[in-house]
Image (spheres, rainbow, N blue to C red):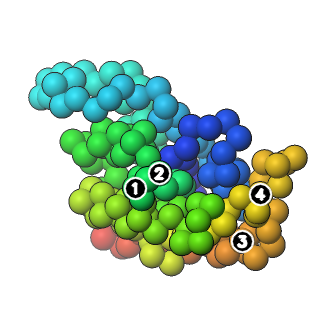
Amino acid sequence: MKLLALSGSLRARSSNGAVVRSALALVDGPTATADIGSLPHFNPDLDGEGATPPAPVAALRTAVADADAVLIVSPEYAHGAPGTLKNALDWLVSSAELMHKPVALITASPSPTGGDYAHAQLRETLRMLTAEVVTAACREIPAIGAKIDRATERVADEATLADLRTAMSHLAAAVTAATEHAAAADA
């Protein structure tokens, strides 16, 4: 499985970045992260018919298209999804890179709810993009701060690591099933 990760947090030492690094370390196969902080504000005038999208947008679309699956890890800001992450997803609306692509959505928050508002909003956006949200690979991680080892910038809590391992396993299984389905359809 070639996995692309998008982090909804731009902070260098964010808890969500630690979740991304920890989850990617559990994946058997190539992994990459996309820089969504360099994307311009979404503007359909820059992406209309015949227009060439800005270079960071083209790079994001290529990275998503090249991946077998996408992992989105996000904090919750003011009971919602971070604007930078929503902006990145908005740039994918007019293209088909996420269509039917297996996606795992993980929200991680210091709150006891694990970022449930952001999780619900992002799931709705992904549904509209016709991404294949793999429910068994989605998680809401509460009280994330206490679960991170700040020296290694990775998840240190064993139960959370086991849960991430299970989530990544479900995502890999979804990729395998999609590949087998596509092969059977081509036969």
SS at mark 3 in the image:
helix
Q: Quadrant of the C terminus?
A: bottom left
User: Which of the two discs, 4 and 2, labels the residue nearer the N terminus?
Assistant: 2
Callout 1, which amino acid?
Answer: Gly
Q: Residue at x 29, y 43 (%)?
A: 90
Q: Residue at x 38, y 72 (%)?
A: 181
Q: Residue at x 34, y 52 (%)?
A: 98
SS at mark 1 in the image:
loop
User: Which of the two discs, 3 and 1, labels the residue nearer the N terminus?
Assistant: 1
From the image, tell me which residue sits under label 3.
160
SS at mark 2 in the image:
loop
Q: Is residue 28 visible?
A: no
Q: Residue at x 41, y 65 (%)?
A: 117
Q: Position of residue 14 (x, y in %)?
A: 66, 45
From the image, tell me which residue sits under label 1.
80
User: Which of the two discs, 1 and 4, labels the residue nearer the N terminus?
Assistant: 1
Q: Quadrant of the N terminus?
A: bottom right
From the image, tell me which residue sits under label 2.
77
Assess disc 4: are there few (<14), some (14-19) or many (≥20) residues with their C-alpha within 10 Å of its C-alpha: many
From the image, tell me which residue sits under label 4.
148
Spatial CA span between label 2 and label 3: 22 Å
Q: Are marks 1 and 2 in contact (CB under 8 Å)?
A: yes
User: Which of the two discs, 4 and 3, labels the residue nearer the N terminus?
Assistant: 4
Q: Compared to 40, does 80 lie above or below?
A: below
Q: Are marks 4 and 3 in contact (CB under 8 Å)?
A: no
Q: Position of residue 152 (x, y in %)?
A: 84, 48
Assess disc 3: are there few (<14), some (14-19) or many (≥20) residues with their C-alpha within 10 Å of its C-alpha: some
Report whether 150 appears left or right of 114.
right
Farthest residue in the left direction?
49
Callout 4, which amino acid?
Answer: Ile
User: Which of the two discs, 2 and 3, labels the residue nearer the N terminus?
Assistant: 2
